[in-house]
Image (tube, rainbow, N blue to C red):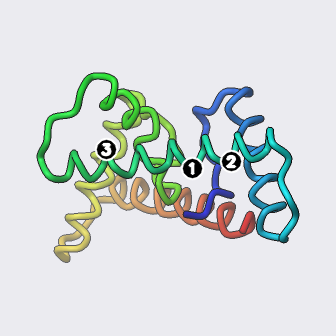
Amino acid sequence: ENSTKVENRGTLTAEQKAKFEKFRTIKNKLSSGQTLTADEQKIYDEFKAKKEKIKALREKQSKGETLTTEEQNLLNSVKGRKHGKGHGKVMTAEQKAEFEKYRTIKSKKEKGEALTAGEQKVYDDFQAKKAEMKSKTNSQK
């Protein structure tokens, strides 16, 4: 997983961002062959453990097994973050409605149906926003 995409995640608190930056520094140090301090090793191990727990919960969920409320809350807290999807943002009702409108228009376009001028504008605006986000993500790699 490319963990450098965190900058686009609007839902991280200042504390979470600081922890992530610390983890990124530790990961870079480890990648360059440097030795970690005891505190750095502890932070690294905690991040790895959380990542493994989330992976196990996703597998459990994909098998149709029931998750506890605590497990579901943990998954919800990271939902959409894997691979930068959604950039970790929780969509408002208005944003969800806009996205559904776009999906309907996209489906119509993919079927070869003609779009109205308004639909075309919504489609073009969304595509431009998507390209901008992709450009930002790629420039951070």
Q: For mark 1, what is the residue?
A: 48
Q: Position of residue 50 (x, y in %)?
A: 51, 42
Between discs 1 and 3, the one toward the N terminus? 1
Q: Crowding near pointer 1: few (<14 within 10 Å), some, many (20+)?
A: few
Give how far apart the Cα atoms at labels 1 and 2 are.
6 Å
Q: Crowding near pointer 3: few (<14 within 10 Å), some, many (20+)?
A: some
The reply to whether dot 1 and dot 3 touch (C-beta < 8 Å) is no
- Decide: is 129 above or below 32: above
User: Which of 98/66 is in front?
Assistant: 66
Q: Position of residue 102 (x, y in %)?
A: 33, 53
Between discs 2 and 3, the one toward the N terminus? 2
Badge 2 marks a residue whose secondary structure is: helix
Q: Position of residue 136 (x, y in %)?
A: 69, 61
Label 3 amino acid?
Answer: Leu
Label 1 amino acid?
Answer: Lys
Residue at (87, 64) in percent of width and height:
34
Badge 1 marks a residue whose secondary structure is: helix
Residue 40 left/right relative to 20: right
Q: For mark 3, what is the residue?
A: 57
Q: Position of residue 32 (x, y in %)?
A: 84, 70
Q: For mark 2, what is the residue?
A: 44
Residue 54 left/right relative to 116: right
Residue at (84, 61) in percent of width and height:
29
Residue at (19, 77) in percent of width and height:
112
The reply to whether dot 1 and dot 2 touch (C-beta < 8 Å) is yes
Badge 3 marks a residue whose secondary structure is: helix
Residue 83 left/right relative to 44: left
Give how far apart the Cα atoms at labels 1 and 3 are.
14 Å
Q: Crowding near pointer 2: few (<14 within 10 Å), some, many (20+)?
A: some
Label 2 amino acid?
Answer: Tyr
Give how far apart the Cα atoms at labels 2 and 3 are.
20 Å
